Amino acid sequence: MVAAADAPVTPSQVQAELARATGQELAYTTVMTTLARLHDKGALDRTNAGRAFAYGLAAEPAELSAALTARQMQRLLDAQDDRAAALTRFVAALSPEDEAVLTSLLQDHPAPGDPGAAARPSPPPAQPSEEAKPR
Amino acid sequence: MTGMGLLLAGVPFLAAVPFLAATVLTASSGRLARALPPPTAVRLLTLVALTTALGCGYVLAVTAVWALGQLPALATIGHWSAPVLSHSELLPPAIGAALGVLVLGLLGASAGRALRHLTQLHEAQLACRQLGPGVDGLIVINSAEPDAYTLSGLTSRIIVTTAMLKALPPAERRALLAHEASHRRHRHHAYNQLSDIAAAANPLLRPTARAVRRAVERWADEDAATQLGDRPTTARAIARAGLARDAARGRHQSPDPRETVTTAVTHDVPDRTRALLAPPPRRRPLATTFVLLLAATSALGATAAGHAVEQQFDHAQAGYPRQSLGR
């Protein structure tokens, strides 16, 4: 949730987003405590935003080791043909036909209501068609 | 002598059994992987690939030894009678030598492949350690390239880029994470690696190894769909992630030719999406039995062929001139 946001988010924003995604309300304090814990662990950075803290992804130590790790992973990624089994990728590369097929599949099966569609920049083919929205 | 003649007639037949199994697999792996529920397909096809690879290798090795045993020099060393072994003229020693070279080549290829996988596991393990534990093994990387994968060594991490998270609505993000969590939980990479080693030991099994790779992704897809209780959302997550990654790659660089070539033929992503839009896979007792029988046949065929050749050597040793031993 925090990682997907463009700017640091406050606990109330996270709470609202979670409610929209999962359909269940979490207590504000639960969200706040979770974010504060993640901050303590060094996973998140926080800045003052009015009365609350705004949380963003921690960039510093992760970035440094990530640079190191990135080189190692790059080698595994480079070997990503039929051989590199240590790395299982979510989606493989597409051929132009695949692209067309997927675009039409997404159009034929749009997400109901498409929660969070307004909040995020989505690729053009991902736009759900108007008539598919539930009344 | 009639018993022996029968035995000799049987050897080539028995020896051919694992190869027949491998050929049947070459032709049917893709269809089996699509028909069977993915977890069954992954486990059974890996099992039958390993059994058949071992069976074929064993039969080749045994046949090579049999043919080479006709060489008088080797017969003297091993105390058997070369003429008794060369009872049939099916296999001149030259063929034995050729088979021997082939066996060593295949053995070398599979050992090399196994070594490569071990190296990669080690590298992945190092990377996992440097990445730290993450949150439940999840590492989010700040990157404009939409990508998501599971990195597996002894432990594993799920790596997702910020761009990928931004490309997906929340429900689809959960599908992605459930998919990768399934890879971690079931150690899917091991099936990929084992079937790949089997394919290195026997190139006839390459389609089977590819089928295992695809079935592994389907397994994780089905797990994600079950966890979310929502097949269409999982299908959309795959389609959207594929398009997002593709769009970004198109913008940044020309596509990697290797990857494009391998996937252009298989259309994995659309196939997976379609499979999730279809009803969940049913159990297929017939197909399951077929694969198990195939595995059993190649194991039994290889063992029987080995046994028959062993008997040949027993005969030949019995026929070894006594006086040279008695002295």
Image (cartoon, coloured by chain):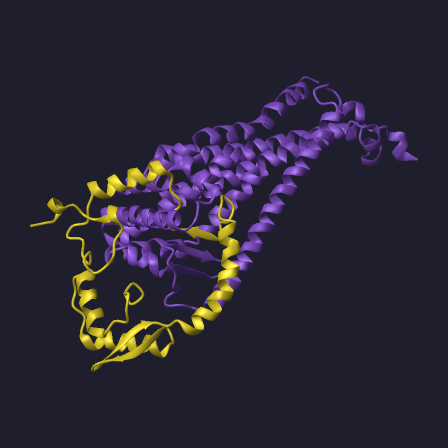
Quick one: quadrant of the C terminus of chain B? top right
Above or below residue A13? Residue A134 is: above
Compared with residue A94, is residue A13 higher up or lower down, i.e. above or below?
A: below
Horizontal arrangement in the rendering, residue A104 relative to residue B10 (left or right): left
Assign the N terminus of chain B to one quadrant of the image: top right
Left or right: where does residue B110 sit relative to residue A71?
right
Q: Nearer the viewer, residue B25 or B125?
A: B125
Q: The chain shown in yellow is which?
A: A
Between B64 and A131, the one nearer to me in the picture: A131
Q: Report the label total.
A: 0
Residue B136 image-quadrant placement: bottom left
* Chain B on-screen colour: purple
Q: Is residue B177 left or right of residue A51?
A: right
In this rendering, would A9 be left or right of A44?
Answer: left
> Residue A76 placed where, x, y %?
51, 54
Query: Is B165 located above or below residue B238 in the figure?
Result: below
For image coordinates 54% across by 32% down, the residue present is B204
